[in-house]
Amino acid sequence: MSSGLRIDDVDGVRTLTLDRPDVHNALDWSTREALVAALADAGADLAVRAVVLTGSGDRAFCTGADLRVPLPALPKPDGAPDHAQGDVARGIATGWQRLVTAVLDCEKPVVAAINGTAAGAGMHLALACDVVVMADTAKLVPVFVRRGIAPDAAGAYLLTRLVGPQVAKRIYLFGDDIAPAEADRLGLVACVVPAAEVPATAMALARRLAAGPTRTLAITKRLVNRALDTDRDTALVEEAWAQELVMTTEDAQEGIRAFIERRETQFKGW
C-alpha cells in the first residue's frame, strides 16, 4: 500500500482509492507507480474479478499530476541543463501514458466512480476505465488549453474514439468544463447518480461484473479496445482466436451446461 493509495478487497472486487484529498487527489510519481502496480496485481490475482477506481472525499476524483512533487532524477554532468531535450516526452511516456495503458490493459473490468472533479490527466484516467459512474456534482475538466499545453495521458486517443474527432476538437480547443448531463449525453459515462449513491452504484456494477466469466470479460475488453485500431481481416482473425481461447475455460463450459440444464450460471472466474 502507498500512502496515497488505499486498496480494499470485498466480494471479488478490488477498490483502489486515490487518497490524497489535501491536493484534490492529484498524483505524485510514487502514488502513480503504486496505482500501476496495483492494476497489474489485480489483473493477475484470480481472487480479484473486477476493480473500482475512485477518489477520496467528495471534492475530487483526480486532478492530474501533483506538479509540486519533483520526479526522481539521475545525476547530471557538469554544465548540463536542468531540463534536457527528451525529458518531457520520456516523462509522459513512462508516467501518465503508462498509467492509462495499465487501466486499458488490466485483465479485469475497471469501473470508475467519479466522486468529484476529474481534471486534466485525471479526466483521461477516468475515461480509460471500462464503465464510468459519475456524481451529479462532479465535472470533467479538459484543462490543457487553459494552461497552454497539449492533451496528454493518451487523451486525444481516448476521447476521439469515444466522441469522434469534431466533438473531441471542440472539447480540447475550448477547454470548457463538462457537466454530468453533457458527459451523459456524449456517452462518456454509463450513468449519472446523486453523489451519495456513487460508491454503492459503482460497487453494484463491479459485483455484477465480478460474478461474470472473468476470462471472457478480459478477452471481450481487449477485442473492443483494439476494434478501431485494426483492419477488418485482422479483427475477424482475432475474434475467432478469442473465441477459441474462451471455449477452453471452465466458465464457458459452465455457461453451456447451465443453458442445457435450464439453470443460473455459477461462474468461477477461470
Image: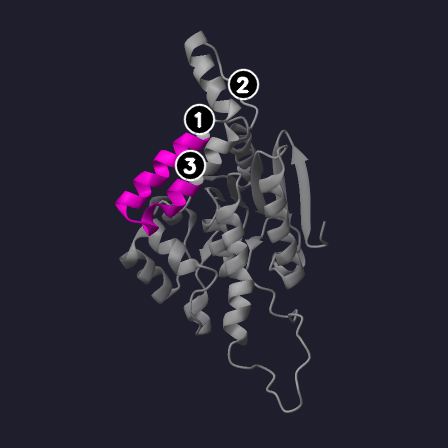
Q: In this rendered view, identify the residue nearer to me: 203 or 196.
A: 203
Among the 4 quarters of the image, the one containing residue 72:
bottom right
> For the residues carrying marks 2 and 1, which lies nearer the camera in this image?
1
Give the labeled residue for mark 3.
Answer: 220
Mark carried by residue 247: 1
Mark 2, Cα crowd under 10 Å, few <14 / some 14-19 / many 20+, is few
Please indicate whether residue 86 sits to the left or right of residue 187 in the image. Answer: right
Q: Earlier in the sequence, mark 2 or mark 1?
A: 1
What secondary structure is the magenta-colored segment mainly? helix
Q: Residue at x 63, y 57 (%)?
A: 33
Contact, mark 1 vs mark 3 (Cβ under 8 Å):
no
Say which amino acid is labelled 2.
Gln
Q: In this rendered view, identify the residue nearer to me: 172 or 76.
A: 76
Mark 1, Cα crowd under 10 Å, few <14 / some 14-19 / many 20+, is some
Q: Is residue 238 magenta?
A: yes
- Outermost residue, top side: 261
| Element under disc 2 | loop
Residue 124 in the image: above or below residue 214: below
The residues colored magenta run 222-245
Say which amino acid is labelled 1.
Met
Give the labeled residue for mark 2.
Answer: 266
* Cα separation between marks 1 and 3: 13 Å
Please indicate whether residue 149 sits to the left or right of residue 77 in the image. Answer: left
